[in-house]
Image (cartoon, helix red, strand yellow):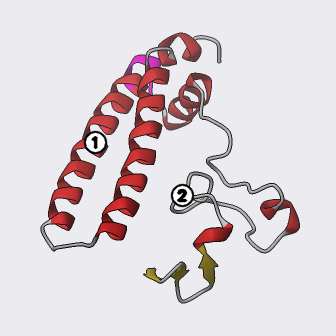
Amino acid sequence: MKRIGNTLVSRFRHISLSMISLPQYFAMSIGDWESEDFQNPPKGNFQCPITSYDLAEFGALLGFSGPKMASILVETVGAIKSAVKETIRLTEAQGIDKGEREHIELCASLIRTECDHLLAQADSVPEMSELL
């Protein structure tokens, strides 16, 4: 996917950036884009926050105990934050313009916010796993 002016262009569809809210349509958001229900109001798989109970349930489906799932979350968030920092560093080294820098910072901010939310939920995953 690439950006041309105020439009994201992929081989499947063109999306005007002025028509969408980036936090709700973050990369790989799942839903039927063409449906009326999806667009009014905008929805995606990031609409509802993930809870510690959801994470405990997901861990149980994978066969992980609550403490193990919490540990995996902490490690994953750390790896994501490190990767974002390195990716920004490498991207800025290519001489990007102000608009690109602002867009990258917005995306990085959204990623950091979601990481912080998951990290806050990780503490309660062991307790929630006992309720399953």
Label of residue 26 in the image: 2
Q: Amino acid at mark 1?
A: Lys
Place of residue 9 in the rendered image (x, y in percent of width and height, measured from the top left): 52, 84
Q: Where in the figure is residue 26, as x and y percent of width and height?
A: 54, 57
Residue 71, placed above or below residue 9 = above
Q: Quadrant of the N terminus?
A: bottom left
Count of numbered marks: 2
The residue pinned by badge 1 equals: 81
Residue 76, given in percent of the width and then of the height, sits at 33, 38
Residue 2 position (above or below residue 36)? below
Seen from the viewer's position, the closer of residues 89 and 129 is 89
Give the vertical position of 112 relative to 36 (above or below).
above
Residue displayed at 56% across by 58% down? 22
| Secondary structure type for disc 1 | helix
Instruction: Specify the label residue 116 is tagged with.
Output: none
Q: Earlier in the sequence, mark 2 or mark 1?
A: 2
Residue found at x 12% / y 67%: 93
**In the rendered structure, which amino acid carries the disc numbered 2?**
Phe
Point out the image quarter for the C terminus: top right
The range drawn in magenta is 64-68
Specify whether 93 is left or right of 17: left
